[in-house]
Amino acid sequence: MCQGQESCHLHFEAEVLDKNTKQSLPFSIVEVKELKSKIQTDEKGFFQIKDLCQGPYTFIISHIGSVSDTIKIILKLDIHKDFFLVHSGIALDVLNIKDKKKSEILNSNSNKLNQDDIDRKAGENLGTILKQLAGLNALSTGTGISKPVVTGLHSIRIITINDGVKLEGQQWGSEHAPEIDPNTAGQIQVEKGAGALQYSGEAIGGLIIVKPSILRSTPGWNGFVNSSISSVNLKGGISAMFEGQFTKTPGFSWRLQGTFVKAGNTKTPTYYLKNTGYQEQDFSASASYHQKKVKLHASYKLYHLQLGIFAGSHIGNLTDLLTAFQSEEPIDKDRFRYRIALPSQKINHHTASIGMGYLLNTKNKLDIDYSYQFNKRQEFDKILGRDENKPAIEFYLNTHSGDVNWRHANANSSYTSNLGCSGLLQSNYYAGSYFIPEYRFQNFGVFSIHKITIKLFTIEAGLRFDNKWQQITRMRQKEVDIKHNWMGMSANLGFLYQFGSHLTFDFQTGTSWRAPHAIELYSEGVHHGAAAFEKGNSNLGSERVFNTSVNMTYSEGKLYQAEITVYNKYIKNYIYLQPRTKPVLTIRGAFPAFDYKQTDANFLGTDIFFKIKLSNAFDFSEKASILFARDLLNKNFLTLIPPNRFENSIGYTLPIHNRLDDVRIELNTTYVTRQNLVDDNQDLVPAPKAYFLIGFAGELQINTKKEPIQVFVSVDNLFNKKYRDYMNRWRYFANEAGTNFSLRVKIPFSSKD
């Protein structure tokens, strides 16, 4: 049947669905006659076959409680196919873990980026990649570090789930980006509905779920090499993935992945930012074994980052600091170089996890998971006379966590439930100067999530209870014994209705809470990476948020798409950093000073997206995010809240020509307003001016005899405009990056052997 090795690189993927309900049919059996093999679909009814030759294939699909079907397909190109089975009427229930990805009534409180979206920003960090979604922003520290901002909230109010594990790192700082290599992701999802309660009740801002692509289900091997270069800091990056399944060990799949990134000093339109280079090395390995009703999986991930701290943010005396605030250019400048000098940071994060999924019967499934994480952060100061190899301060964070999850669905998947519990044991130690205390932390939570679908109407409700214990054991070099205990409920209720085939209405309301972190309670000293002096407040209480959102989505396929979300979050006892009117002078230099405060706050905002196809070749899209965050007790607006943002793009898709496919060019603009809601006296320096940027992007696919090669190009800040971003902590001292040319190339490879 095969037509030569040169055409045996095609990729086929499919989902098996109930024809009436359009819900997925998990663990269906798919027999491929020509391959003489049988494949079992996963929990979502999904399966894939790689490295197929061109030609006809016969698929025999069967599932308990459904009528089997035989479908013939002539395969010429990569394809995604939906297989539909008719319910047989036999009284056997079917387990449904997750609704279908494409034809389901989508939950608009969950936004996703697929593999192409991630590849389009290969080499960038998680915060930058997520900015492709409407309503997502980033809190930056220079060009190498950024963390996601969702509905105006960030850091410890945003929970990140990486490959099923809740990320536990030093997330309290603006320069402490999530310790994640986005190159391991096949999909990145932002969840703001009841589904977030499965993982945490603390996701006041939202939940970010990073999912790897599914491991191979057939013998053979495949992988890719993804490379990227950027001109603004001469950054070069390469990431490679290799995965496979051996013929002699069916059901056992494995994957290896690694990333290396190196960048030098960042160039603004008129000068270089001294000591802003960084170097990142990541590695991950995962394996799974699937047989009948049992699936075992294990993974290990290593994240290592060494980065320089902008030298212009560490000032020796108060006079020079005040001068730096008022200067157009930093006092301490440099030429381009890769060398990372003092001050600097080193971060190592290890994650190991194991788990088991067991299919109890056709409608019940049990998952048990355990993970261990170790985070080590070292901060190196530039005080004269200090040993360059000895950090000024070190943090060691150890975390053990476990989860048990039971999932149930009725016969036609119109009712699903998800019940479970989770536990966490954590300890934090430090060495060197004092900034945050040593502590032990424990958390136990239970949750219950239910979903009912009646024709075009869906109701989803979730409830979670958490009990948290914290013991402070050492602070300011003294042994102490300070104990805290917090407990509370989180809940969410959502209603979704689809009007016909184009319009969807989604209403969500709920409440959640967050206990104060040790840094907010007991920090005191120089926050090294943020170049700031911060002081905690031991009288802080728990935050409690009451949120409501309304979302409307309208779609006519590729012709027209529109979505608008309006949300309101009332946060009782909102914790924030209040800038002092005067900086402080320490032995480590002069720094802006901040105090942790608490107030009642209200976040009212809207996110808008629409895209229209102007012709067969041209399309136009716009994204807008508007937010008002008010301090209700002090009767003013909160600082460090994203200003209003408007993005437009017009794209042109070229006709297919010979071996070139998916050729697209795009001109885009970004307009960010000045944060006029904040008074000048609320911050150390007035908010920067509004700015308008123009950029360019292009992409194409080169079809070769083996695998198609993807090429992405982009130009940011095309006209080299000087500006400062309100959401960048270095805006006190320097401008943003200048024109940046980027090139990304993804080369896949595969074999059936």
Image (cartoon, grey):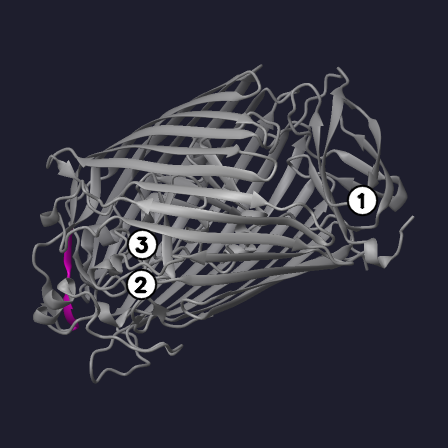
| Left or right, 313 with reference to 584 | right
**Could you tell me residue 513's position as x and y percent?**
30, 36
- Mark 1 residue crowding within 10 angstroms, few (<14) / some (14–19) / many (20+): some
What's the magenta region? Answer: 588-595
Kindly identify which numbered label has been placed on residue 76. Answer: 1
Residue 109 visible in the shown view: yes
CB-based contact (under 8 Å), mark 3 and mark 2: no
Q: Which circle marks residue 440 in the picture? A: 3
What amino acid type should be assigned to the residue bearing mark 3? Arg
Between 630 and 202, the one lying in front of the other is: 630
Instruction: Give the secondary structure at mark 2.
Output: strand
N-terminal of the pair, mark 1 or mark 2, is 1
Amino acid residing under circle 2: Tyr
Q: Which label's residue is closer to the chain start, 3 or 2?
A: 2
Checking the image for residue 429, the label placed there is 2
* Horizontal and vertical percent position of residue 674: 23, 46
Earlier along the polypeptide chain: callout 3 or callout 1?
1
Residue in view at x 83 percent, y 58 percent = 6
Residue situated in front as seen by the camera: 269 or 173: 269
Where, by quadrant of the figure, is residue 199 drawn?
top left
Secondary structure at numbered mark 3: strand
Q: CA distance from mark 1 to mark 2?
A: 58 Å
> Predominant secondary structure in magenta?
strand
The answer to whether residue 352 is seen in the rendering is no
Q: Examine the image and state in which quarter residue 454 appears.
A: top right
Name the image quarter holding the C terminus. Answer: bottom right
